[in-house]
Structures are given as structure tokens and as C-alpha cells.
Image (cartoon, rainbow, N blue to C red):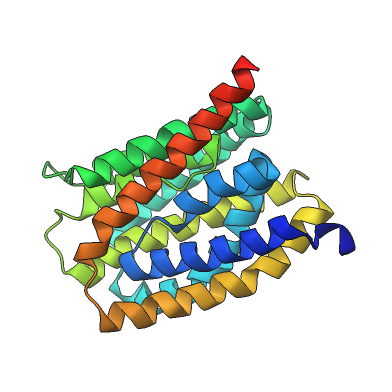
């Protein structure tokens, strides 16, 4: 226990509170903040393990509140796609060099921030095949680089002909599923060490508090003004990770 009680843990708890608040408030983005920042603190595999364990528990309350809004005819094929490609992607994640994973995380986070900032929305056809395809893409990105591909879900669902609460449910549930699949597979394959479990256990209360705080703020204040701020935060964090990668590579 003593070996994990350090300044990095305190920083990680503060990050978890902020990230979970963001996810519950605007519907995505928390894990995209946690993974790159935790990578700087602990390295990519431990960062992904802690983030997904905390996200599963932190988001469970929010997802439970929204589960009745899920349209299973859309989410079931998407979920199947996530499960298949996530499992295959993790085989790459667990064998690739840590620097390669770090580079992939940084690139995806920057692209995610730019995509959301430019407000792209998918307005094409929808159906079983497209839903499954989106699930395959999301699960593959999550499995290979450990970053929940919430921005793809945002692009896909924000222009869908459904209520805002359903859009929120259709974004959050797949994110929860991706985190559940990733954490479960990493644990099953023995990639999660004792120290990682201890850190996650100590960080989880921060994630739970952040989820509650985000829902509270969502009921009191509008979301729209904060989305652009959150997107710039993602771009800055991703750029920091890329800077750290190239600095290490050059030195």
C-alpha cells in the first residue's frame, strides 16, 4: 500500500474527479483526458487499466439511469462490433511497444479534439450494417490504444433523429461497454499488477464523486458553452503527450 501513496496518486485522484465530472456533464471526454495524463504519470498499460476500471465503476450509476432510453435495435449490433474488435485490438495493445501506444494515444486524442471542435456530424444512412461498422471501429480503437472512441459516437449519434437524452444514452452505454471489455480482458490476461489495482481502488471514490457532480451540474447549467472548452483541453493534452513522445525519441 505504501508504495502507491505518493504525489502521482494525489494528482491522479484530482484528474479522475475532473474527468468523471466532464463525462457525466457533457456525455463524453473523461477517459480521453484520463488515459493520456495517466500515461504521463504511470505509462500506457497501467494508465489504460486504471482508467477503464475507474470508468466502469464511475459510469455505472450514470448508465443505469439512462439504460431505459437505449434503443437496442441500434445498440445491439454496435455493441457486438465493439466486443469483437476490442478483443482483437487488445492483442495488439498487449504486445506493442509502449512508445507506439503512447504515440497512438496522443494522435487519437488530438484528432478527437479537432473533430469535435469542428462539429462534424454523420447524416448518412443508418442500419444494422452501419451500426455494426461503427462498433467495430470504436472497439478497435479502444482495444488497440486504450482510448474510448467517444468522439466517433458523438459524430454518429448527434445528428440522429432522436431526443437529446437518447443520444446521451447511445453515447455513454457503448463507452461503458468499451471500458468494461478492455479492463476485463487486461485483467484476464494478467496485465494488471497489484499496484495498479491499489491505485484504481484509491482513485475510484474520486471517479464516483465526479460522476455525481457532473450529473448535478448538468441539471443546473447548460452544456453547450463548455463543449468547446473541453475540446481545446483534449487538443492540449494530446499535443502534450505527442511532445513528450518526440522529446523522448529525440533524446
In front here: 223 or 244?
Answer: 244
**Residue in view at x 32 percent, y 43 percent:** 113
Looking at the image, residue 243 lies above or below residue 115? above
Q: Is residue 159 left or right of residue 223?
A: left
**Residue in view at x 68 percent, y 64 percent:** 10
In front here: 226 or 112?
Answer: 226
Quadrant where the N terminus is found in the figure: bottom right
Q: Quadrant of residue 62?
A: bottom left
Q: Is residue 116 left or right of residue 21?
A: left
**Residue in view at x 53 percent, y 54 percent:** 179
Q: Quadrant of residue 152?
A: top left
**Whole-percent x and y of residue 28?**
37, 58
Looking at the image, residue 97 lies above or below residue 240? above
Please say whether residue 140 is visible from this viewpoint.
no
Q: Is residue 111 left or right of residue 142?
A: left
Q: Is residue 131 left or right of residue 22?
A: left
**Whole-percent x and y of residue 192?**
75, 49
Looking at the image, residue 25 lies above or below residue 102? below
**Residue in view at x 16 percent, y 46 percent:** 121
Quadrant where the C terminus is found in the figure: top right
Please say whether residue 94 is visible from this viewpoint.
yes
**Whole-percent x and y of residue 12?**
63, 59
**Whole-percent x and y of residue 166?**
24, 68
Direction top: furthest residue:
250
Q: Total label count?
A: 0
Amino acid at each position: 500500500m505504501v508504495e502507491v501513496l505518493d504525489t502521482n496518486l494525489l494528482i491522479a485522484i484530482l484528474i479522475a474527479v475532473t474527468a468523471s465530472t466532464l463525462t457525466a456533464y457533457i456525455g463524453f471526454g473523461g477517459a480521453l483526458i484520463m488515459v493520456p495524463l495517466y500515461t504521463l504519470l504511470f505509462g500506457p498499460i497501467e494508465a489504460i487499466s486504471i482508467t477503464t476500471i475507474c470508468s466502469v465503476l464511475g459510469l455505472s450509476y450514470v448508465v443505469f439511469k439512462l439504460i431505459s432510453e437505449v434503443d437496442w435495435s441500434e445498440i445491439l449490433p454496435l455493441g457486438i462490433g465493439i466486443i469483437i474488435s476490442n478483443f482483437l485490438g487488445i492483442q495488439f495493445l498487449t504486445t506493442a511497444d509502449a512508445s507506439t501506444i503512447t504515440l497512438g494515444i496522443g494522435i487519437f486524442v488530438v484528432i478527437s479534439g479537432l473533430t469535435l471542435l469542428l462539429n462534424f456530424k454523420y447524416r448518412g444512412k443508418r442500419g444494422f450494417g452501419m451500426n455494426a461498422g461503427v462498433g467495430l471501429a470504436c472497439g478497435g480503437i479502444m482495444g488497440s490504444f486504450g482510448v474510448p472512441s467517444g468522439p466517433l459516437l458523438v459524430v454518429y449519434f448527434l445528428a440522429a433523429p432522436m431526443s437529446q437524452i437518447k443520444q446521451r444514452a447511445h453515447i455513454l452505454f457503448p463507452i461503458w461497454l468499451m471500458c468494461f471489455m478492455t479492463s476485463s480482458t487486461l485483467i484476464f490476461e494478467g496485465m494488471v499488477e497489484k499496484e495498479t489495482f491499489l491505485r484504481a481502488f484509491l482513485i475510484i471514490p474520486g471517479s464516483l464523486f465526479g460522476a455525481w457532480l457532473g450529473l448535478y451540474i448538468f441539471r443546473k447549467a447548460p452544456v453547450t458553452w463548455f463543449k468547446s472548452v473541453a475540446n481545446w483541453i483534449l487538443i492540449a493534452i494530446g499535443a502534450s503527450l505527442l511532445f513528450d513522445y518526440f522529446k523522448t525519441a529525440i533524446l
